[in-house]
Amino acid sequence: MSAPARTFTVRHIQLLRALFAAAAALMITFSPDHSAAVGFAVFGGFVAASGFIFVLGAWLAVPSGSRWPLIMLGAIDLLTAIVSGVPTWRTDSVFFVVVIIWAAATGLVELIGGLRVRRTDPTAKDAITVGALGLVLAVALLVIPSGYSLQYSVDGAEALTLTGIILAVGMVGGYAAIVAVFLAIAGFSPNRPSATDGVTTEDADTDGATNASAETGGAA
């Protein structure tokens, strides 16, 4: 007897993550202020929403033996959201530290979780890709000096300053945009058969043939 179909699946998790990632990307893109305070506000809301999605997904969307990646991702996101909400910590250097740690931690968890089930779970490649994107974000922010400052001017406008925090917040927005597009495509893609489906079918055929042979032998 097959297990009942789940009403909340990994596809729903992907689509909800894509929705909140797109919202974060749009808010950063259209905000004229890329300060640490604004960056923390948007980033904190994004990870808080993602954390609740992971917790809900661990409870409703996956079997009990496969919940550890979602539980860990949810815990990391919710803890990061709490840290991001502390007003006195909303400085440039803390923004770099928090986002780098978050990107590296969630990237590793999602990458390892996807690699462990890559032969049986058709959505494993999606987790591997998003995990790799998180690690790329962490490396990119490590390369940018938090105290970076560049003065430049544009014809017809006053002198402008490009700082490390502007680049960092922009990187987070770019990451969110890429993740939103990728997860939206993954969520709307047709379901792919898993390796276990094929094994189950073959086992069923083998069992059927064995039973038929047994019945034929018994009749003879």
Image (tube, rainbow, N blue to C red):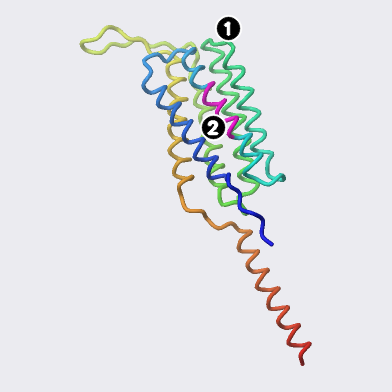
Assign the magenta stretch its main secondary structure.
helix
Q: CA distance from mark 1 to mark 2?
A: 26 Å
Q: Quadrant of the N terminus?
A: bottom right
Residue beneath the point at 60% across and 51% down: 121
- SS type, badge 1: helix
Q: Amino acid at mark 1?
A: Thr
Which x, y percent locates residue 143?
Answer: 50, 22
**Considering depth in this image, is 193 or 136 the residue closer to the camera?**
193
Q: Furthest residue to the right?
A: 218
Residue identified by numbered label 2:
134
- In the visual, does 99 lie left or right of 72? left
Residue identified by numbered label 1:
88
Q: Residues within 10 Å of mark 1 (few under 14, many from 20)?
A: few
Q: Residues within 10 Å of mark 2 (few under 14, many from 20)?
A: many
Numbered circle sitting on residue 29: none
Query: Does residue 207 sit above or below 125 in this rendering?
Result: below
Counting residues from the start of the chain, the first of labels 1 and 2 encountered is 1
Which x, y percent locates residue 8?
Answer: 58, 44
Residue interval drawn in magenta = 44-53
Residue beneath the point at 51% across and 12% down: 92
- Rendered image quadrant of residue 73: top right
Q: Amino acid at mark 2?
A: Gly
Numbered label tally: 2
